[in-house]
Image: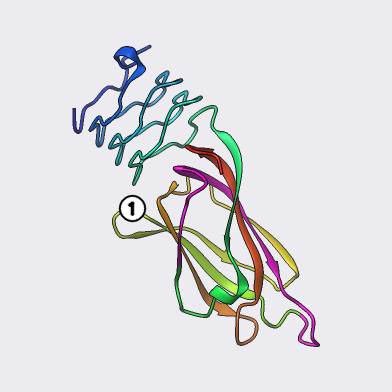
Amino acid sequence: MEGGQLEGATGWVPANRDLCNAKVKGAILSGFDMECVNLSSADLEDVKLCGADLEDADFQGTVLCGANLQGARRGRAATVDVVQASSLRIGAPVVFALTQARALCIDSVTLRNQCGNGHGYSHCPKRMEIYTATGPWTSVVVLTSAPKKQQTFTAAPGAPLLTGFVQVVVHDTNGLTAQITSMSLQGTAWGPAA
């Protein structure tokens, strides 16, 4: 059913609520009742699930690159911790696996910066960017801020879904290095809980 157009099929659900190993790349499943559907190992690349009910759907091993889950209902609130201070240097991308969820619609990013030692806030990131792997790296959010110990940035509505691997790049700081003690992503997640 690759590239299938199922939009408008009101009340459609797969037979036996099972799409295990299905290849529905590019399908439009917006607004469908996908509650408790087995999506394990399914290829949902570029699938539109906007507004779908995904409560208790099984996303184990599901491919979600480029999928659109904006407005999908009944995911779980999640906070995903991603990097430590020693990992981030200007212009040196850090890549990590999104292991705590198969997909995350990001709402905000929180940074806690290391301050002190007479340097004040001179090593806080001034501009950094978060990417997700949807084929080529795709920018999800660019963070620009004044320096302070804890910073929370709100992602723009409709930001691309985070799936699989996430890349963080510090473009500029207020000093020579980025000294971030913790970074977390907050949003709505689907898939395995940590």
Q: Is residue 103 left or right of residue 63?
A: right
Q: Residue at x 76, y 86 (%)?
A: 119
Where residue 56 sits in the image (x, y, percent)? 50, 25
Q: Residue at x 59, y 76 (%)?
A: 86
User: Compared with residue 30, is residue 102 higher up or lower down, i.e. above or below?
Assistant: below
Q: Amino acid at mark 1?
A: Thr
Residue 4 sits in quarter? top left
Crowding near pointer 1: few (<14 within 10 Å), some, many (20+)?
many
Where residue 139 sits in the image (x, y, percent)? 42, 59
Quarter in which the N terminus is drawn: top left
In the image, residue 119 lies in the stretch drawn in magenta: yes
Q: Residue at x 75, y 69 (%)?
A: 149
Q: Residue at x 35, y 32 (%)?
A: 40
Where residue 69 sits in the image (x, y, percent)? 43, 36
Q: What segment is highlighted magenta in the picture?
A: 95-120
User: Compared with residue 121, is residue 157 higher up or lower down, i.e. above or below?
Assistant: above
In the image, residue 170 lies in the stretch drawn in magenta: no
According to the picture, the residue beneath numbered tag 1 turns out to be 134
Where residue 16 sits in the image (x, y, percent)? 33, 13
